[in-house]
Image (spheres, coloured by chain):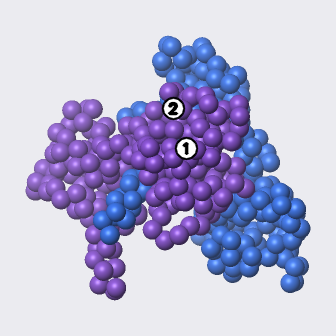
Chain colours: A purple, B blue
Amino acid sequence: MTETKQTISRELPPEPTLRRLPWYLAYVSLLRSRHVDYVSSTSISKELNVDASQIAKDLSVLNIKGKTRIGYEVAVLEKALKDFLGFTRQHNAVMIGVGSLGSALISDTGLERYGLNIVAGFDVNPDIVGSTIKNVPIFHINELPERRNAYQAEIGIVAVPVEQAQTVADTMVAAGIRAIWNFTPFRIRTQPGIVIQNTSIYAHLAVMYNRLNAQKQQ
Amino acid sequence: MTETKQTISRELPPEPTLRRLPWYLAYVSLLRSRHVDYVSSTSISKELNVDASQIAKDLSVLNIKGKTRIGYEVAVLEKALKDFLGFTRQHNAVMIGVGSLGSALISDTGLERYGLNIVAGFDVNPDIVGSTIKNVPIFHINELPERRNAYQAEIGIVAVPVEQAQTVADTMVAAGIRAIWNFTPFRIRTQPGIVIQNTSIYAHLAVMYNRLNAQKQQ
């Protein structure tokens, strides 16, 4: 058991690394648009304010090598980052809760460029069920099991009111969803083996308001 | 100097606390909707999987007291959390970049309930400039300084393409913006005193894809 766990944890890049890699990708894409050919960890470090040795360590998960005194080839690094991060493959996802935030996320075509393909939305509101948003059909939540299966969607995005978050998550897991992207501030609990990512955009507002107030009082 | 810094840091709740408080708020609002009158740190702890002593410490910033063996009054705790987090006051904000994500965020009425009042959008695209989204007018970015001043907006939301993030941030700060909510994966740099919050929703996708893949390979 212990050995298996060690093997897995050695293979899995730590979450902070996975969160920093998209920063490097953003910067490298910017460089490519400016026709820059090579970039070093040192120059990424200066631009992004991340320690150069940390960057080199993060980039080591990519299995590409930089050249001494020249650095990484920008185009190669960009492609390696996109591939590694899964942005070049399409991942089918369903949206649960097609209210204000849910329909906004369906409309955000940016998600497609990062490999997220929202194939259907689910809600209980009769005004929404049966409609489409940017060609994405909205079904009744009761249809989730069969539709999810037909679409082979593994990712479920939760954008329901907070008091329904846990119930909806249980329904999703029962329907075969393997990863939950939770946009509610509720801490969803589920069985081991189900991936959960929390994106509580409103929590960031709380931090911003507080720091803004603190600045004023100085 | 040292003393001043210490005073400030004593008053400012740490960022992890500020990020957890909205979780408690979500749970407490759920309890209120279920007509529960009292809640203890212990029961919040069980529900949210956060250490009870951590919860008690986090809630101590609110200056309200729980009753021994009964806990906090749900309605009082909910109001105290909302007030402390700034969700009961309106904060004027401008949206810079009204593409897919920017217009989606303007359409998300959920932000209003968390005290964010998006008063105007700014873009360079002639197809968008001059239009409105949910009654929010979209202006040319050149109009930012005077419009920001007229609206007294202190918060600027960045939803531009990554290669424009830094330039746009500089323009915003010059126009009097005091807090930047950055939705691009680019690490914006700015002068001290400007509050920056990064919400890189696409970075969460990278973590989710990676963990989902790892689950499959087990």
Q: Position of residue A53 (x, y in %)?
A: 27, 64
The dot on residue A95 is 1
Q: Which residue is more in the foreground, B25 or B34?
A: B34
In this rendering, the answer to whether A85 lies above or below B105 is below
Residue at (63%, 40%) from the top-left corner? A140
- Circle 2 — which element? strand
In this rendering, the answer to whether A80 lies above or below A63 is above
Q: Are marks 2 and 1 in contact (CB under 8 Å)?
A: yes
Taking the image as shown, residue B172 lies to the left or right of residue A85, namely right
Q: Quadrant of residue A66?
A: bottom left
Q: Does label 2 or label 1 sit earlier along the sequence?
A: 1
- Circle 1 — which element? strand
Q: Which residue is more in the foreground, A53 or A24?
A: A24
In this rendering, the answer to whether A73 lies above or below A1 is above
The dot on residue A136 is 2
Cα separation, mark 2 vs mark 1, equals 10 Å
The dot on residue B55 is none
Residue at (63%, 55%) from the top-left corner? A168
Pick out the residue farthest to the front: A146
* Residue A54 seen in the figure: no
Query: What amino acid type is highlighted by mark number 1?
Result: Met
Residue at (38%, 54%) from the top-left corner? B209
Query: What amino acid type is highlighted by mark number 2?
Result: Val
Q: Which residue is more in the foreground, B149 or A210?
A: A210
* Residue B215 seen in the figure: yes
Quick one: quadrant of the C terminus of chain A?
Answer: bottom right
At label 2, counting other C-alpha atoms closer than 10 Å, the crowd grade (few under 14, some 14-19, many 20 or more) is some
Chain to which the residue tagged by mark 1 belongs: A
Chain to which the residue tagged by mark 2 belongs: A
Q: Quadrant of residue B108?
A: top right
Q: Position of residue B179 (x, y in %)?
A: 60, 44
